[in-house]
């Protein structure tokens, strides 16, 4: 298949992940906002079952999860050699498309955790976004916290449970730290499997629930205050979006709240003074570099009533819908959705 004079940019969507649906919403928005005059999008859809397809249909069908129609889907894989080729398995034979860069819009496991990044790096395809190590580290709440803690960034007190950990350890930790307490899968996104518990009797069910999403579970102390975020773009010279703030009326920013804002609100810029915003941006950039991030990511932190910044997590592929936090923060800093994508992709294409 001929290479056009526009760079071929693979956009990967879907995924063998509990966040498959979130990816479809993000990817369809990315495709609509991409500058098609400048880039030739090569759409690679991954089904819920992990099957890969070269997709030639519309963004609307991705959004509606009706994209898996044989007319538009042809089985495909990325060649693991350094050819940078997408292999498309047509009835008439194998066709190839050479990829100039890849933008994975995959959330959660098997997409945001370094696995897909490994395939791309093996194939020599430049990644628009974080690589293998930073993706894997940031997906792992425990190890990301340990790395940040070694760099003197404050992190919540925590305890990691394995399948063979005595439940007594969890109760001892809870007694020492106090309630409320958070119980989370170590490696999961979009708040899947996370519980905020107020009493000791909720502890065991919450741990059981979290173990459905991962083989390691982390217990974390509650941090008084509210959550703030910082969108970052770049690898060497970093661009930050405006700091945002999550206002909650109750509970925590769980899956439902993230995607409906039913009883919460996001304020961009955050309702805090300029100096504190600058401090948050600097802390976010420091965490971003500590964890080896590149391309783009969203760093989430807590701001305590005393004004202390506490690290929460890094999303290496944050939500990319029109209403998502990352584009919202960048828009407040003067970048349109199309400009954000252009800057993300250019970093990879010029490698």
Image (spheres, rainbow, N blue to C red):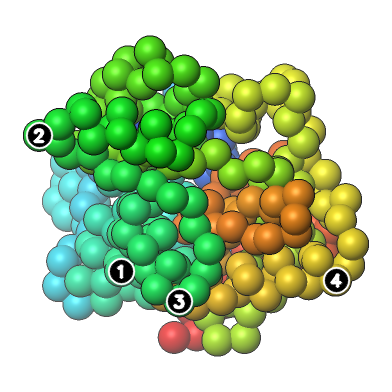
* Residue marked by disc 1: 133
Q: Nearer the viewer, mark 1 or mark 4?
A: 4
Q: Quadrant of the C terminus?
A: bottom left
- Count of numbered labels shown in the rendering: 4
Mark 3: which secondary structure? loop
Q: Earlier in the sequence, mark 3 or mark 1?
A: 1
Sequence-wise, which precedes: disc 3 or disc 2? 3
What is the distance, in whole Å, between disc 2 and disc 4 at their CAs?
Answer: 46 Å
Q: Which mark is residue 275?
A: 4
Q: Which residue is mark 2?
A: 164
On the picture, is 138 further left or further right than 29? left
Dot placed on the residue nearer the N-terminal end, 4 or 3: 3
The alpha-carbon separation of the residues under discs 3 and 1 comes to: 18 Å
Give the mark nearer the N terminus: 1 vs 4.
Answer: 1
Residue at x 59%, y 57% (from the top left corner): 310
Dot 4 crowding, Cα within 10 Å, few <14, some 14–19, many 20+: few
Question: On the picture, is 163 further left or further right than 343?
Answer: left
Whether residue 5 is situated above or below residue 118 in the rendered picture: below
Separation of disc 1 and disc 2 at Cα? 27 Å
Q: Does dot 4 land on a helix, a strand or a loop?
A: helix
Residue shown at 83%/52% (left/top)? 270
In the image, which is nearer the foreground, mark 1 or mark 2?
2
Give the quarter of the figure containing the N terminus: bottom left
Query: Of marks 2 and 4, which one's residue comes earlier in the chain?
Result: 2
Q: Tell me if 93 is positioned left or right of 22 in this view.
A: left
């Amino acid at each position: 298949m001929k290479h056009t004079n526009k760079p071929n940019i693979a956009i990967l969507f879907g995924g063998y992940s509990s966040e498959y649906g979130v990816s479809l919403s993000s990817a369809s928005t990315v495709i609509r906002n991409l500058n098609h005059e400048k880039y030739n999008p090569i759409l690679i859809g991954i089904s819920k079952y992990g099957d890969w397809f070269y997709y030639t249909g519309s963004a609307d069908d991705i959004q509606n999860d009706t994209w898996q129609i044989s007319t538009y889907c042809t089985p495909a894989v990325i060649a693991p050699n350094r050819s940078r080729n997408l292999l498309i398995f047509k009835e008439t034979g194998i066709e190839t498309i050479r990829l100039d860069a890849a933008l994975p819009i995959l959330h959660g496991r098997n997409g945001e955790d370094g696995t897909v990044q490994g395939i791309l790096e093996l194939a020599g395809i430049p990644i628009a976004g974080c690589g293998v190590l930073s993706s894997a580290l940031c997906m792992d709440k425990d190890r990301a916290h340990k790395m940040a803690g070694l760099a003197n960034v404050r992190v919540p007190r925590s305890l990691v449970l394995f399948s063979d950990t005595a439940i007594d350890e969890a109760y001892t930790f809870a007694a020492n730290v106090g309630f409320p307490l958070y119980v989370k899968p170590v490696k999961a996104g979009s708040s899947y499997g996370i519980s905020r518990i107020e009493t000791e009797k909720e502890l065991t069910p919450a741990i059981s629930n979290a173990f459905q999403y991962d083989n390691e579970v982390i217990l974390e102390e509650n941090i008084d205050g509210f959550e703030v975020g910082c969108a970052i773009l770049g690898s060497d010279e970093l661009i930050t979006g405006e700091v945002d703030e999550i206002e909650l009326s109750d509970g925590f920013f769980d899956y439902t709240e993230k995607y409906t804002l039913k009883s919460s609100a996001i304020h961009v810029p955050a309702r805090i003074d300029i100096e504190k915003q600058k401090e948050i941006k600097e802390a976010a950039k420091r965490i971003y570099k500590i964890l080896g991030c590149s391309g783009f990511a969203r760093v989430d932190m807590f701001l305590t009533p005393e004004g202390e910044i506490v690290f929460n997590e890094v999303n290496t592929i944050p939500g990319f819908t029109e209403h998502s936090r990352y584009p919202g923060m960048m828009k407040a800093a003067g970048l349109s959705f199309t400009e954000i994508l252009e800057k993300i992709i250019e970093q990879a294409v010029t490698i």
